[in-house]
Image (cartoon, rainbow, N blue to C red):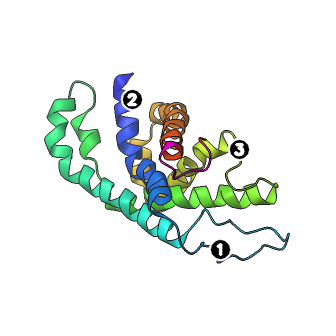
Amino acid sequence: MLDLIILAMWLMMPAYIANPAAALLGGGRPIDMGKYFTDNKRILGDGKTIRGFILGSLCGAIVGLLQIWIAPYIAPYLAAYVSADMLMHASYMALFTMPVGALLGDMVKSFFKRRLGFEQGAMMPIADQLDFVAGAWALTLLLDTSWFFSNFTLAIVVTVLIITPLLHLATNIIGFKIGKKNVPW
């Protein structure tokens, strides 16, 4: 079980980093430029900013690049838990698709939350915890299909779907405590 958790977190790390990095480093001009949709509601809201999207994506990509570089050095220490081949089966395309997809998934969820009448920061269980996973996987599946299927086995997918809500809640509580989030979810 520990091997699945380690590998799932390793594979998801660029996506996992993108969201909190966007929140921590974001601010400034909203992506929707303050515009309203045809239903007279903001398209995304002030919480989705250009700076957050760019810096969150960049942080996720940098983490992914660091993973590629350090994999040969840490693989021997994790050999009891994870196959070295899995750690070193890298994709430079996934460096882009995982963090960018994560933030796009979060934006898609925000768009639909606005349509459903949820205010910015309002809790929408399950969607709030897994939107970025769906976005990361969708973009990676679209642009790096073979890498996705060679890494995201059914066991890894299930593990990600179980651990991500717990990790998401923990990072949001931290973001709330340090004043970067208005709500702890």
Q: Of callouts 2 and 1, which one flags the residue occurring earlier in the amino acid sequence?
A: 2
> Tag 2's secondary structure?
helix
Give residue 124's mark. 3
Are there few (<14), some (14-19), or many (20+) residues within 10 Å of tag 3?
A: few
- The kind of residue on which mark 3 rests is Met
Marks 3 and 2, how far apart at CA: 27 Å
Left or right: residue 131 compared with residue 12: right
Q: Is residue 150 visible?
A: no
In the rendered image, residue 173, in percent from the top left (x then y), is placed at 53, 39
- The kind of residue on which mark 2 rests is Leu
Give residue 32's mark. 1
Q: Quadrant of the N terminus?
A: top left
Tell me, yes or no, whether the highlighted magenta stretch contains residue 179. yes
Disc 2 designates what residue? 4
In the rendered image, residue 183, in percent from the top left (x then y), is placed at 62, 45
Please identify the quarter of the rendering in which residue 127 is found. Answer: top right
Q: Nearer the viewer, residue 179 or 10?
A: 179
Q: Of callouts 3 and 2, which one flags the residue occurring earlier in the amino acid sequence?
A: 2
> Tag 1's secondary structure?
loop
In the rendered image, residue 126, in percent from the top left (x then y), is placed at 66, 39
At x 48%, y 41%, the residue is: 174
Q: Is residue 185 above or below residue 90?
A: above
Q: Report the residue that reaches farthest toward the right.
A: 39
Q: Of callouts 3 and 1, which one flags the residue occurring earlier in the amino acid sequence?
A: 1
Q: Quadrant of the C terminus?
A: top right
Start-end of magenta stretch? 177-183
